[in-house]
């Protein structure tokens, strides 16, 4: 007799690796992937980096709201806590897999706390089971959140293991903060193992309770893989940046950490910036003083250029600043200090060494400083490109030239080295993220500047019109809008007409129709 098992009734976690075991096996080198990636992101046009979805919405969305879905989840948990059994666990788990836990976790926790008849001991055990055994990220997040309702020092290793993966760092941070007596020290240890959204979440909650923590905040605390701006003001305040820079000389690690913080404060963005930082006047004055004696890198010089631009802004902005903590004399002294540093001839060799270094970060800052110092580095970069013809950085840098001969030379090189046939697979709805679209991004770096060079790069524009990446097609249209139709050639005229019939994006199609109308086609 053959027995057929109903797979639909099997637990959703059965036959899958638990997320906890997956992270644990990776040791200290957690790579950001998860075993449920394909299932979780199915149907999405882009995938967020680990922790990115929760991080972005947590920083920029409104507070959680109670929903019927939230109440149903908590009612299932309460039912399971009163009489734990496989059927209620499967029902709760199935609900969690389909629920955006991150978007309602605070509301869930509030509802759990006031749910009548819920059994705390069972909730803790179920949270631990989910954190250890769940194969789906939402179930793991829910489990961690439940552990945060209790004293949880006994599951410290479990929480730290999950916390090393940035998808779960926010949840473990809150659980540790709420549930461990030595939570601040535990969070400090975890902060040194994460580098993206997880680091942001921890540093935002980390108390500067020791000199060790303050020193770390100023030296490494700000630097992260998302945006340094999220943490710059927090690290400056909690680390005591003003006091640290007030001495005659500082160690190189502190100077570099201060450079990161000041650069982020000046750039501004999604968090508090230089105008929100009450100690900015004295900090900038001392930083300029220290760089004059100790500055040795292109990043130091780049930040000096940024400070100079800041203190040279228009009078309207400075009227408000001078009525607060600034004054005209301090502004003038900082500007004069920047001018003396910028005039130092030592920077010429430092900039060129950075451009030639092969380190792309140094080359980026070296290129930015070279432009401001009037140093021509185009030939140097082109030579490096010929050695590394697929390095994306050079495509953006080399297109900054206004020299038609140089642009013609570069476009010819790109035409011969980019896989144009592989790019021109037809119009689609792709955003162009991910390694599979690296060549499309290089093409885009060229297309975005071809509007300034009529008649150069027609083959690349033709490729852009037939790219599945939306931005490629938009930038190709930008170039054609600026060119006289006499410079197009028959292939481009035919391609525009053909694309207007196939274009899947309404806004791009409207641009094509307007282009044909404007050019009399």
Image (cartoon, helix red, strand yellow):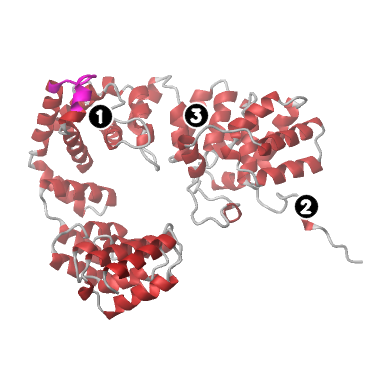
**How many residues crowd around disc 3 within 10 Å: few (fewer than 14), some, or many (20 or more)?**
many
Residue 168 in the image: state x and y as whole percent: 55, 39
Whichever of labels 2 and 3 marks the residue nearer the N terminus, that label is: 2
- Judging from the image, what secondary structure is the residue with disc 2 in? loop
Q: Which residues are magenta?
A: 318-328
Q: CA distance from mark 2 to mark 3?
A: 38 Å
Q: Which residue is mark 1?
A: 251
Whichever of labels 1 and 2 marks the residue nearer the N terminus, that label is: 2
**How many residues crowd around disc 2 within 10 Å: few (fewer than 14), some, or many (20 or more)?**
few
Q: Is residue 514 above or below residue 328?
A: below
Residue 129 in the image: state x and y as whole percent: 70, 38
Q: Quadrant of residue 102?
A: top right
Task: Work out which quarter of the rendered image holds the N terminus and state it.
Answer: bottom right
Q: Which residue is mark 2?
A: 10
Q: Is residue 318 visible?
A: yes
The disc placed on residue 187 is: 3
Look at discs 1 and 3 and give the one toward the viewer: 3
Q: Quadrant of residue 280?
A: top left
Q: Is residue 409 magenta?
A: no
């Amino acid at each position: 007799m053959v027995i057929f098992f109903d797979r639909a009734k099997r637990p959703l976690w059965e036959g899958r690796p638990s997320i906890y075991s997956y992270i644990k096996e990776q040791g200290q080198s957690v790579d950001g992937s998860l075993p449920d990636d394909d299932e979780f992101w199915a149907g999405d046009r882009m995938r967020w980096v680990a922790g990115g979805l929760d991080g972005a919405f947590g920083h920029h969305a409104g507070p959680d709201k109670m929903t019927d879905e939230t109440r149903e989840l908590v009612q299932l948990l309460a039912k399971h806590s009163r009489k734990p059994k496989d059927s209620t666990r499967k029902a709760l788990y199935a609900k969690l897999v389909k629920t955006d836990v991150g978007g309602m976790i605070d509301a869930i926790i509030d509802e759990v706390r006031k749910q009548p008849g819920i059994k705390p001991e069972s909730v803790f055990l179920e949270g631990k089971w989910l954190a250890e055994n769940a194969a789906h990220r939402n179930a793991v997040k829910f489990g961690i959140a439940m552990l945060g309702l209790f004293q949880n020092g006994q599951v410290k290793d479990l929480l730290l293991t999950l916390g090393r993966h940035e998808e779960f760092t926010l949840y473990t941070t809150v659980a540790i903060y709420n549930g461990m007596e030595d939570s601040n020290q535990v969070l400090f240890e975890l902060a040194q193992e994460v580098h993206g959204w997880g680091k942001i979440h921890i540093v935002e909650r980390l108390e500067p309770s020791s000199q060790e923590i303050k020193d770390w905040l100023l030296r490494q605390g700000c630097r992260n893989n998302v945006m340094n701006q999220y943490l710059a003001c927090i690290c400056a305040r909690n680390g005591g940046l003003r006091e640290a820079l007030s001495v005659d000389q500082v160690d190189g690690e502190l100077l570099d950490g201060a450079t990161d913080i000041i650069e982020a404060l000046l750039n501004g963005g999604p968090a508090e910036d230089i105008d929100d930082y009450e100690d900015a006047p004295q900090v900038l004055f001392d930083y300029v003083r220290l760089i004059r004696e100790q500055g040795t890198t292109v990043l130091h010089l780049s930040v000096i250029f940024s400070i100079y631009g800041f203190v040279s802004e228009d009078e309207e902005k400075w009227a408000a600043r001078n009525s607060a903590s600034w004054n005209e004399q301090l502004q003038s002294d900082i500007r004069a200090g920047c001018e003396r540093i910028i005039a130092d001839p030592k920077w010429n060799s430092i900039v060129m060494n950075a451009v030639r270094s092969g380190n792309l970060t140094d080359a980026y800052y070296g290129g930015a400083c070279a432009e401001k110092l009037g140093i021509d580095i185009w030939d140097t970069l082109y030579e490096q490109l010929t050695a590394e013809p697929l390095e994306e950085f050079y495509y953006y840098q080399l297109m900054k030239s206004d020299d038609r001969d140089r642009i013609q030379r570069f476009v010819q090189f790109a035409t011969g080295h980019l896989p144009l046939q592989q790019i021109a697979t037809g119009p689609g709805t792709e955003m162009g993220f991910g390694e599979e679209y690296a060549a499309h991004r290089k093409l885009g770096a060229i297309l975005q500047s071809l509007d300034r060079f009529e008649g150069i790069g027609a083959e690349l524009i033709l490729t852009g019109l037939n790219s599945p990446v939306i931005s490629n097609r938009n930038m190709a249209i930008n170039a054609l809008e600026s060119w006289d139709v006499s410079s197009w050639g028959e292939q481009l005229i035919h391609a525009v007409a053909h694309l207007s019939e196939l274009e899947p994006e309404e806004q791009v199609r409207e641009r094509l129709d307007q282009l044909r109308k404007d050019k009399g086609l």
